[in-house]
Amino acid sequence: MSDLLTLMEVGGPLAAIGGAAYARHAHPAAYWSTVGLPLSVARLLASYSSTMEACGLTVEPSRWRALAIRATTRREVRPVPPRRGLVRPTSTGLCMRLRLAPGQEPADVAASTERLRHAWGVHAVHVRDIKPGVVELRLVGYDVLRKVRMPRKTDADFLKIPVALREDATACVRDYRVVPHQLVLGATLSGKSMFLRNLFTGLARQSVVLVGIDCKRGVELAPFAARLSALATDPAQAAELLPALVQEMEDRYDLIKARQGIAPGASDEEITSDIWGLPEGMRPAPIVLFIDEVAELFLVATRKDEERRDEMVTHLIRLAQLGRAAGIYLEVCGQRFGAELGKGATMLRAQLTGRVCHRVNDEASAKMALGDIAPEAVEAACAIAPERPGLAVVGDTSGGWSRIRTPYLSLAEAAAICRETADLAPDVHRLVPFRPDVPTAALQRLPTPAPLHRPVTE
């Protein structure tokens, strides 16, 4: 009996420690909810003031406060940390708001995130500016990008597609109304196609015109042909499709101008400068143009090809400069996109507000994507390991950037979604000649189960 008690006294704690170590590696979410969360909350509450002081985030108290402390307690007046709000646990970490002390700014807190991470025993600390004088600290308990689980609640809406998970455990939403055009770069097997697949299937569920240019003979976009309103699979077809899109854009501008020619006594709500101000019955459906391997449109072998290239690039630049008001958006993908591609490449890239950079083969490619908008993100993009496909750095012209990772979605599931949503494709008269041929059997509605977003694992 005594041996059994000894075994339980010794073996019980060892089994608990071993189980916790296994759960931390294999099931980090479960480990965080049961072990990591209580420990981190205890560390935070016990060491908040001392940690803030060690990180240089305290300030001298006001004169009146110092006098009150000396008069009532007779104790030493210590520096004051930012006022802390309630600590709110989440499924992936903790959230709390800080009211900054006089003289502090959000950059002061952001500069100390690495120290706070170690002090409170969490995987990462992220700072978000809420309003003047208030910031939000989001503590992430484990590496959420190792096994991607998209949040249940996302800011999804028309032309707003949750496409990936950010490193702070929030959804990365592609909003075409805010960022009309985007450049997606990545080397082979970097996860660029998975990003495109998630974005495409998200748009396929909405009443949006989807147009594709895939000069790799359609190997990337042909499986989605049932949902495409137009598809070009080589530069010759692209040279015919792009002028049709430009003409469609000009027709939409004529529609907007006709609406602007209303009577002088009309209300301000009836005056518009883009298609979103038109009445719903007059408003044309938005168009999203996907270009896979944009370099194929720039590469030429003969002088005749060079003339065709210049014409296509001119059309692309016009769409990028003027397409937003007409509801035409660009999603440009490639392995590399620099000035060496030829005339017009740099000008086109400058019009692409959003930037997504997956793993690339050299630093110059990362600079092409992020160097002109967020130079500090270039180093993060170059550090992406080949063992983590789908990991990328996303940024925009505001200078902000973050790491994201795309959830896994198989090609079969994506193609099934496109077949199921084929009837949502709006009719555009000018694009009818470019609609891809789809066998009738492929358009039949099959009892396909709802696709599951499985994580991209290491």
Image: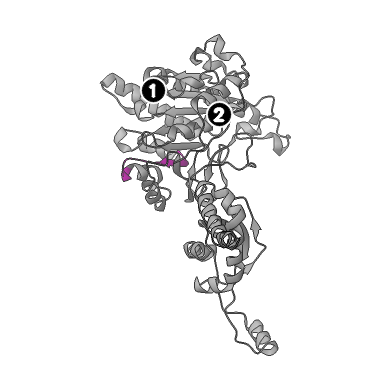
Q: Amino acid at mark 2?
A: Thr
Q: Which residues are magenta?
A: 352-364
Q: Is residue 142 in sight in this rendering? A: no
Examine the structure image and report whether residue 355 is included in the region drawn in magenta. yes
Which badge, 2 or 1, is on the more N-terminal residue?
2
Q: Locate residue 72, reporting x and y percent.
A: 70, 87
Q: Locate residue 448, reporting x and y percent.
A: 61, 21
Residue bearing the label numbered 2: 201
Q: Secondary structure at mark 1?
A: loop
Q: Nearer the viewer, mark 2 or mark 1?
A: 2
Residue 215 tag number? 1
Question: Is 333 displayed left or right of 85 in the figure?
Answer: left
Examine the structure image and report whether residue 3 is included in the region drawn in magenta. no
Q: Is residue 83 in sight in this rendering? A: yes
Residue furthest left as drawn: 302
- Of the 4 image quadrants, the one containing the C terminus is top left
Question: Is 256 displayed left or right of 264 in the figure?
Answer: left
Question: Is 244 displayed left or right of 294 in the figure?
Answer: right
Crowd around label 1: few <14 · some 14–19 · many ≥20 (10 Å): many
Q: Amino acid at mark 1?
A: Cys
Q: Nearer the viewer, residue 292 or 38?
A: 38
